[in-house]
């Protein structure tokens, strides 16, 4: 085990070894889009995805995927329908984005930017 780098801050120093370098670098990774959006984007492309597949694509646990799906369904962003032994998800693209800075826009507009091949209900104009 060799020391690869030392990171100094005002309060301490952190020694990075080849055992913890990869884990420490992965902890600092972040993205502009949330896991909730990534789940919706996966379902927009394939409404019949299994929870296991959603989790793998997004890079989260199956438990986290279930929690996100439940939150999205409870908030009215999708509807789950049982088809045989599988679930089929319908996204409600007319629902507004949740942050006050973007709540005049619809989730379907954002999904169409990242997945133009999907077909969601046409966006309706909203007046505030």
Image (spheres, grey):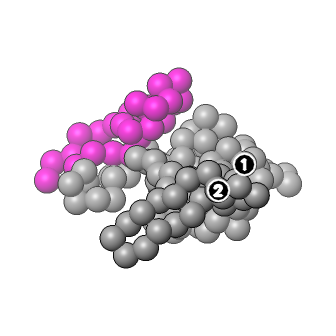
- Give coordinates of residue 112: x percent, y percent: 43, 32
For the point 64% across and 65% down, the residue is 64
Judge from the rendering whether residue 14 lies leftward or rightward of residue 52; answer left or right: left
- Give coordinates of residue 45: x percent, y percent: 61, 34
Check if residue 115 falls in the magenta segment: yes
- Give coordinates of residue 40: x percent, y percent: 54, 47
Secondary structure of the residue carrying tag 1 is helix
Name of the residue lying farthest toward the bottom: 11
Mark 1 / mark 2, whichever is N-terminal: 2
- Give coordinates of residue 49: x percent, y percent: 72, 45
According to the picture, the residue beneath numbered tag 2 turns out to be 3
In what quadrant of the picture does the N terminus appear? Answer: bottom right
Name of the residue lying farthest toward the top: 117
According to the picture, the residue beneath numbered tag 1 turns out to be 56
Q: Nearer the viewer, residue 92 or 41?
A: 41
Secondary structure of the residue carrying tag 2 is strand
For the point 33% across and 59% down, the residue is 98
For the point 84% across and 52% down, the residue is 84
Q: CA distance from mark 1 to mark 2?
A: 33 Å
Instruction: Name the magenta segment's main secondary structure.
Output: loop
Instruction: Estimate how packed mark 1 is, as few (under 14), some (14 to 19) or many (20 or more) residues with alpha carbons within 10 Å.
Output: few
Could you tell me if residue 76 is visible in this image?
A: no
Of circles 1 and 2, the one toward us is: 2
Check if residue 17 falls in the magenta segment: no
Name of the residue lying farthest toward the right: 85
Q: Nearer the viewer, residue 100 or 9?
A: 9
Judge from the rendering whether residue 14 lies leftward or rightward of residue 104; answer left or right: right
Residue bounds of the magenta highlight: 104-128
For the point 67% across and 44% down, the residue is 57
Could you tell me if residue 119 is visible in this image?
A: yes
Q: Nearer the viewer, residue 38 or 108?
A: 38
Judge from the rendering whether residue 121 lies leftward or rightward of residue 63; answer left or right: left
């Amino acid at each position: 085990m060799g020391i690869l780098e030392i990171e100094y801050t005002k309060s301490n120093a952190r020694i990075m070894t080849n055992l913890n370098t990869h884990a420490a670098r992965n902890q600092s990774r972040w993205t502009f889009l949330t896991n909730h959006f990534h789940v919706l984007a996966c379902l927009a492309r394939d409404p019949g995805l299994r929870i296991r597949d959603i989790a793998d694509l997004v890079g989260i646990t199956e438990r986290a995927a279930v929690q996100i799906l439940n939150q999205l369904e409870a908030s009215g962003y999708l509807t789950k329908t049982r088809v045989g032994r599988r679930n089929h998800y319908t996204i409600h693209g007319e629902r507004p984005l949740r942050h006050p800075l973007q709540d005049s826009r619809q989730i379907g507009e954002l999904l169409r930017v990242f997945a133009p091949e999907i077909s969601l209900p046409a966006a309706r104009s909203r007046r505030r």
